[in-house]
Amino acid sequence: MVFGLSKNSYYQEEQKRIRDSIKGPLLELVLWHLPHLQPSESAQQDSWEMIAIKLNNRNFDLSVGTDHQDEMPTLNGGFIKGIYDELMKKFVGNIRYVNSSAGVYSTPRVCNNRDPLYETLYFPIRGTYKDKCDQILCELFYLDSAGIEIMAQLSKERLEKEYRHLQHSINEPTPLDEKTKTRSYSDSKNQLDQLKEKLELEKLKRYQEELEKKAKRVEFLDNENKRLLELNHELVLQLQGSDH
């Protein structure tokens, strides 16, 4: 334990050090993959885990050959999601203060409205932030409802398609026989099975790529250990030779 720090204080300092070291890369990966906006909970968890793997690989690359090689812990998806949620919560909470300090509104301010969403809608915050991390958080804030908007758009397109089909059926009535209905159901099921298989293959491909990267790193470390052993052996021989 560090002298002068309690166990809890040391733990908190360590957590802060980890957060600070991965904050920028984490936000860039979240903006690229949007794990929190994936359509299912399992897809979100997989995406967070994939980001954790990439951050672990990055930390490994940066620490190889340094004194901190064994100090950086292995991150997991749940931990980095917690860090992201904390960063976004702090960002949203500070919107009104950034607004007040800049004092620029696109419409007159309603003084009794303290909702951060109000501040965002009536204040051009994109041009206010200069820090890269704040800029990324700003874009992620605006994208927060993107998943719902996409779902709504897809539902609208599907509804329009159904109405067109209904209109076509009214204009040219052509009753479907049982054989046609069966074939239509079979085609839909085949498409769904193909989609599931494609998603599984993509997921396996991602994991395979990450495993290959780890295998290369293990091979590198193994070669490095062999090289150090050889150097150590040569040094021992030299020392023994100098004794005679």
Image (cartoon, rainbow, N blue to C red):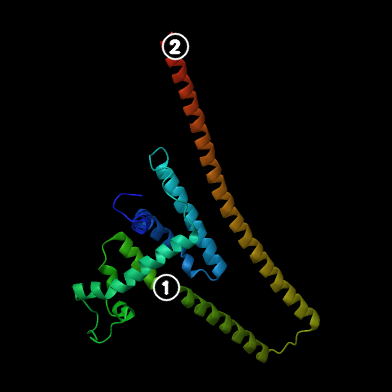
195, 215: nearer the viewer: 215
Counting residues from the start of the chain, the first of labels 2 and 1 encountered is: 1
Badge 2 crowding class, 10 Å Cα cut-off, few under 14, some 14 to 19, many 20 or more, is: few
Circle number at residue 144? 1
From the top left corner, tell me how far across and down residue 225 is, in percent. Answer: 50, 32
114, 124: nearer the viewer: 114
From the top left corner, tell me how far across and down residue 207 is, in percent. Answer: 57, 53
Dot 2 lies on which element?
helix
Taking the image as shown, residue 228 lies to the left or right of residue 13, namely right
From the top left corner, tell me how far across and down residue 31 is, in percent. Answer: 41, 63
| Residue pictured at 28% horizontal, 61% vertical | 131
Taking the image as shown, residue 35 lies to the left or right of residue 125, namely right
Taking the image as shown, residue 135 lies to the left or right of residue 195, namely left
Dot 1 lies on which element?
helix
* Image vertical order of residue 132 relative to residue 236, above or below: below
Q: Residue 82 falls in which quadrant of the image?
A: bottom left
Residue type, label 1: Asp
Residue type, label 2: Gly
Q: Which residue is mark 2?
A: 241
* Image vertical order of residue 8 relative to residue 186, above or below: above
